[in-house]
Amino acid sequence: MSLLRQGRHFILIGLLQWLVDWGVMVALSRLGMAVAGANLAGRVSGALLGFWLNGSITFAVPGRSPGWRQLGRYLVLWCLAAAASTGAVWAIDQGFGLHGAWLGKPLVDGTLALASFLASRHWVYR
């Protein structure tokens, strides 16, 4: 699959992941959960969806499904991205409050998306 096609699929799937992630974070924090925990729950929800869709569509290899090796690599990448996202959203919350964290989360996650695409293409799904 071409880089352009992979990039397009990654962006579309990433937007869907992000909507799930952000929606869960906002819903749980609105219900009173701490922002860091709500963000982590949102990221887990989006991650499960993203691993399956990107492995099945974006970085699919004909005749091969994503296996344990890919899952292990994905979990390492996800843990690093989740820690970076949660730390940044927490810092925004501390500096600008809950509404600032809600608004800042898309900027944080957008920045992490580029690094995730490159790592997924060249390491996770290889």
Image: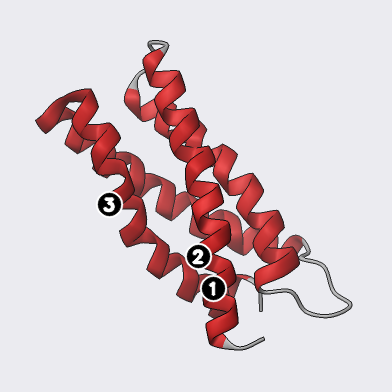
Q: CA distance from mark 2 to mark 1?
A: 5 Å
| 56 left or right, relative to 45 | right
Disc 3 or 1, which lies upstream in sequence?
Answer: 1
Residue at image x 19%, y 37%?
A: 91
Disc 2 or 3, which lies upstream in sequence?
Answer: 2
Q: Quadrant of residue 99?
A: top left
- Examine the rendered structure and indicate whether residue 87 appears above or below residue 23: below
The answer to whether mark 2 and mark 1 are in CB contact below 8 A is: yes
Residue at image x 85%, y 74%?
A: 64
Disc 2 designates what residue?
11
Q: Amino acid at mark 1?
A: Arg
| 68 left or right, relative to 76 | right
Q: Whole-percent x and y of residue 62?
A: 84, 80
Disc 3 designates what residue?
107
Q: Amino acid at mark 3?
A: Leu
Q: Around disc 1, counting alpha carbons within 10 Å, would you say few (fewer than 14), some (14 to 19), or many (20 or more)?
A: few
Q: Whole-percent x and y of residue 97?
A: 16, 25
- Examine the rendered structure and indicate whether residue 27 appears above or below residue 60: above
